[in-house]
Amino acid sequence: MLGNASEFCLLLAENYYEQLYCEVKAQGEGGRLPSFYEFQKNNEITQALLLKRPAAKFGVQVVLPKRVQSTTKPFSEPDASSHAVIGDEGDSHYLNIDEQKHEKFGPYELNKCLFEAAHIVCRGERYQLIANQANTKLSRGALIGGNRMAIPVYQGLVDDREALGRYLSKAYQQYIQKMLEIGLGGSTFSYAKFVFLFHDVTTKGIDFSQRFETMFGFLKQDKQHLAVNEQLAKNVQLVKNQCDWMSETLVVCDAGRKNYIYQRQH
């Protein structure tokens, strides 16, 4: 069946409850739930209550949202006009790669690159925009159960911004690499969305790494049964400050509602 990866339910989910909605549906439960788009219109409390009974049928206890204290500023979801750049909890403008590589792969060097819709040229090297890939093009074993997301558990304090920034930077690199492995490099979360989801699930007392492990498992199942459109994204419009180095071979660009990955060509 040919489809667009943007139609994969989990790739449309904006928060924990919407992810859980997709998983309930994937388990064949939730026959009385509204459509996904109608579900999204509800607040978190209503979403949680709607999911409570169908989720319980396959052993998931839905965590109700905690009431935010009036003195506490909640971590807000990023909007389409803003982006968090990689390397800090949401403010830094570069990826935390090795110190020795900072001068070569920092934001100043990236500003010297030539940006076009389908590629970026930097230091004479070409970085090509990544699209989703058919299963026939994936490495052997990419979609098996043993291929795990394997994001480590955060061991530090949530209010330690420096430590949390380093953790989220490394965790995001792992997430992107795994999405590339299963052929969904054209349908990734932005770093801003990734940071938001970390706070969204951890404030509910849910293990962030396990949440992404569960999501990854369902994405692999979907990928086994749904073909993807391999065409490159159209109408790509970028400004240089939306992009950051992820590694020597990858550049990631957060364009608000869409995230773009560029990979160095051999």
Image (cartoon, rainbow, N blue to C red):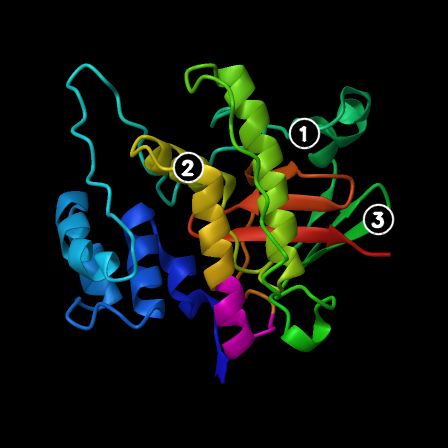
Q: Residue at x 42, y 20 (%)?
A: 158
Indicate left or right for 217 with 29 as reference: right
At label 2, counting other C-alpha atoms closer than 10 Å, the crowd grade (few under 14, some 14-19, many 20 or more) is some
Q: What residue sits right under mark 2 in the picture?
A: 207
Q: Specify the amino acid type for callout 1.
A: Pro
Tell me, yes or no, if residue 173 can be seen here: yes
Query: Residue 107, which numbered label?
Result: 1
Q: Secondary structure at mark 2?
A: loop
Query: Residue 125, which numbered label?
Result: 3
Q: Can you tell which quarter of the image residue 33 is in? A: bottom left
Q: Nearer the viewer, residue 107 or 51?
A: 51
Tell me, yes or no, if residue 92 can be seen here: no
Q: Specify the amino acid type for callout 2.
A: Asp
| Magenta span contains residue 114 | no
At label 3, counting other C-alpha atoms closer than 10 Å, the crowd grade (few under 14, some 14-19, many 20 or more) is few
At label 1, counting other C-alpha atoms closer than 10 Å, the crowd grade (few under 14, some 14-19, many 20 or more) is some
